[in-house]
């Protein structure tokens, strides 16, 4: 790194501004860059973030698109400032540093490493296979919510899980319709179900793993919604990471659409949270 880069002015944004930018920008038009270490990323990260530790950035900056807007963050803002200066020196057009880093982030977070769940999307799948896998993930989350209905004792919580499960029914029905449209096949949803992967829910995490990760308080509606937000953030993260690995253009497009739909779900859950607080 050149010494003069230490004096390069950077444009910084608050967590609130960063959330607005992310929510208003198509995923194809922004890079969220995490410059911490892999273990830090695994513990928590902004959904959809690309991990390149700041120590590797000089050699790996060509892995990200300099024409896109780039939002850079670290733990508290120090490493991301250096990373932002590096990218500016590399002629990246629009680079923003997240003030306060992940510690200041007041939005949804994903967990686990970069490869988690990608065994479901190796990058070699056809569009048909990608649709089947996505359907299975949505079905897995629906089954998770239904199992929580049976477990919860609080009636309002039961009703909340019912509402969440119905959202997933609509989502997987849309995937099935997309499957029929894109493959031009004529099969029933029952026939389609026989081909579906059901070993994980959204985000590539099993029901048991979700329970262990989030330990939801089944007596608290706000805690239930918070858990749902975490799960949807995990799904967004997986779909976006998977889109970067697939080779088939239609599969890539579909996975990005799924990631954007998860962002819509997150907004809906935010509104739902406001209604019960």
Image (cartoon, rainbow, N blue to C red):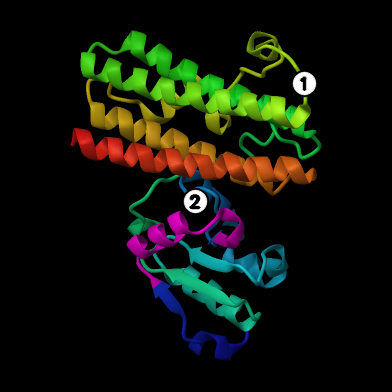
Say which of 172 and 118 sits in front: 172
Q: Is residue 20 magenta?
A: yes
Q: Position of residue 181 (x, y in %)?
A: 71, 29
- Indicate the quadrant where residue 77 lies: bottom left
SS for callout 2: helix
Query: What is the number of the mark on residue 40?
Result: 2
**Is disc 2 surrounded by few (<14), some (14 to 19) or many (20+) residues within 10 Å?**
some
Quadrant containing the N terminus is bottom right
Say which of 198 and 139 sits in front: 139
Name the side, left or right, on which 22 lies relative to 277: right
Q: Position of residue 256 (x, y in %)?
A: 62, 45
Q: Residue at x 69, y 49 (%)?
A: 244
Q: CA distance from mark 1 to mark 2?
A: 45 Å
Q: Residue at x 37, y 15 (%)?
A: 148
Q: Position of residue 168 (x, y in %)?
A: 48, 25
Q: Position of residue 217 (x, y in %)?
A: 27, 24
Q: Which residues are magenta?
A: 13-32
Q: Is residue 21 magenta?
A: yes
Q: Main secondary structure of the magenta part?
A: helix
> Mark 1 = which residue?
185
**Is disc 1 surrounded by few (<14), some (14 to 19) or many (20+) residues within 10 Å?**
few
SS for callout 1: loop
- Comes first in the chain, label 1 or label 2: 2
Q: Is residue 183 above or below residue 108?
A: above
Q: Is residue 78 above or below residue 24?
A: below
Q: Is residue 87 above or below residue 123?
A: below
């Amino acid at each position: 790194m050149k010494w003069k880069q230490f004096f390069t002015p950077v444009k910084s944004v608050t967590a609130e501004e960063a959330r607005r930018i992310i929510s208003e920008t198509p995923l194809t038009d922004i890079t969220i860059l995490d410059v911490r270490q892999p273990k830090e990323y695994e513990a928590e990260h902004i959904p959809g973030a690309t991990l390149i530790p700041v120590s590797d950035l000089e050699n790996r900056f060509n892995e990200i698109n300099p024409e896109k807007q780039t939002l850079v963050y670290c733990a508290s803002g120090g490493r991301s400032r250096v990373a932002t200066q590096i990218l500016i020196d590399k002629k990246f057009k629009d680079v923003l540093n997240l003030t306060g880093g992940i510690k200041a982030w007041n939005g949804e977070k994903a967990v686990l490493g970069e490869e988690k769940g990608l065994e479901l999307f190796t990058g070699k799948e056809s569009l048909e296979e990608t649709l089947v896998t996505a359907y299975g993930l949505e079905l897995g989350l629906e089954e998770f919510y239904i199992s929580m209905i049976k477990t919860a004792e609080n009636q309002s919580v039961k009703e909340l899980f019912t509402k969440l499960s119905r959202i997933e029914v609509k989502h997987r029905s849309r995937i099935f319709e997309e499957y029929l449209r894109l493959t031009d096949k004529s099969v029933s949803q029952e026939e389609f179900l026989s081909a579906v992967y059901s070993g994980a829910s959204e985000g590539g995490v099993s029901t048991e793993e979700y329970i262990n990760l989030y330990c939801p308080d089944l007596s608290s509606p706000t805690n239930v919604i918070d858990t749902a937000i975490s799960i949807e953030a995990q799904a967004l993260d997986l779909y976006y990471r998977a889109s970067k690995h697939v080779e088939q253009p239609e599969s890539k497009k579909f996975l990005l659409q799924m990631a954007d739909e998860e962002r819509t779900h997150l907004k809906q859950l935010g509104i739902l949270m406001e209604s019960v607080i």
